[in-house]
Amino acid sequence: MVRFYREVAELLKNGENVVLVTLFDRTGSAPRTSGAKMAVKSSGEIIGTVGGGRLEGDAIRMAQSLFVSRQSLIQSFDLTGTDVAAMDMICGGKGELLLDFLDAAAENNRQVYETAASVLAGKEKAWLVTRLGKNEAGEPSRDQCVIRPDGTMTGVMHCDPYILEKMIAGPAKIAIHAEVVSDQRFLVEPLRPTATVYIFGAGHLSRRIAPLSETVGFRAVVLDDRAEYANRQRFPDVEQVAVIESFDQLPSLPFDENSYLVIVTRGHLYDRVILEQVLNTPAAYIGMIGSRSKRDKVFGELTRQGCDKERLARVYAPIGTNIGAETPEELAVSIVGELIQVRSQRENAACATASKGNCCQLREPVAGQ
């Protein structure tokens, strides 16, 4: 998404108007593609996708009409069963599209998307808020801004500051959502770092875990010391596949609090040496495949080597939620389900902590913006 926002900002900087299409769900039961974005140029050329198929084709045609009207709008859609399956929707085929006309002559537009890209590139958090309504003369009006957690705003937003504070507070702050206030429509999009799942081992189980984790919003990185396993033929749609020299000495990897480490190598020895190397990382999650007896054996070996028991207590082992999984497909579901659970708990805890402190107090726009 960083690259996408940068490309949009660059088009605006070069004087090219753009229609930005964002898919969302008005009921709260979002499709997997909710939040997907596509930039449409006046030529019909696109950057990004909102899922393909009939919906994307219709969105492109509607977007091109906005280069004439120079207005933004929200368009409802209701897809057929075939279209729903093609777009990988899980909660029906109803939703909405924001088709937002971005005038390159309006400096605010470029600033907003440059800021959005900067927030994501810097692994910060913020919200992209779009308002569609009418002005005092009854004419269509639009505002857009990026708001950081400290209340700093880049852009313009003509509405009661209290309304914005409520929109970016509580559980809703972590997911794209729409709000209606009087005759105004708001779309609030969280800008947050994407959690990365590092999967150690490129065997048959990893082939199920990696693509499944990406369908639920994680970025998957698969690592193995065997080129015949860690390759694009086996993992065609995963974000990154890498062959490392050895599990005994992992390469430098950018582990942070948004990292989820899944240890599913081909053997007990490799699992142990990886676990030993990642225990001191700030990763949000460390999980290791295997039975309780294997876990106890590994933990015992590490304890005898001086490993702190509190560090070992961080490890999810046996890995995965207890759903009685037996097949690789079922095990992948249990593992990814546990990743989702941990991510949700962390984000809800962060929301609860924020709500106990000072509410986001909106500040004046950044100087010069």
Image (cartoon, grey):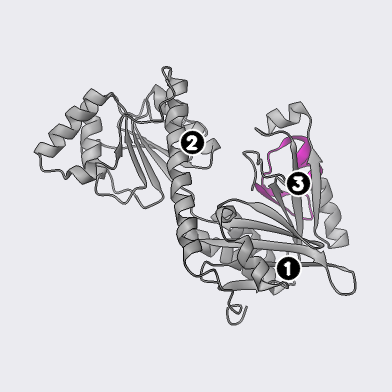
Residue 223, picture quadrant: top left
Q: Position of residue 303 (x, y in %)?
A: 13, 38
Residue 227, picture quadrant: top left
Check disc 2 and report its element: helix, strand or loop.
Answer: helix
Residue 249 visible in the current orientation: no
**Type of amino acid under label 2:** Ser
Q: Nearer the viewer, residue 130 or 300?
A: 300
In this rendering, would 273 be left or right of 72?
Answer: left
The image quadrant where one finds the C terminus is bottom right
Is label 1 in contact with label 2 (beta carbons under 8 Å)? Answer: no
**Type of amino acid under label 1:** Asp
Q: Position of residue 137 (x, y in %)?
A: 90, 74
Q: Nearer the viewer, residue 200 or 89?
A: 89
Q: Which residues are magenta?
A: 36-59
Q: Nearer the viewer, residue 333 or 8?
A: 333
**Type of amino acid under label 3:** Glu
In magenta stretch: residue 44: yes
Q: Nearer the viewer, residue 17 or 185?
A: 185
Q: Which residue is mark 1?
A: 143
Q: Is residue 22 above or below residue 250?
A: below
Check disc 3 and report its element: helix, strand or loop.
Answer: strand
Whole-angstrom CA distance, mark 3 to mark 1, is 19 Å
Q: Residue at x 48, y 57 (%)?
A: 352
Tag of residue 213: 2
Q: Position of residue 85 (x, y in %)?
A: 69, 28
In this rendering, would 4 be left or right of 347?
Answer: right
- Work out which residue is located at the far bottom of the displayed protein and give it: 367
Whole-angstrom CA distance, mark 1 to mark 2, is 35 Å
Determine crowd level at label 3: few under 14, some 14-19, many 20+ residues with C-alpha closer than 10 A.
some
Determine crowd level at label 1: few under 14, some 14-19, many 20+ residues with C-alpha closer than 10 A.
some
Tag of residue 96: 3
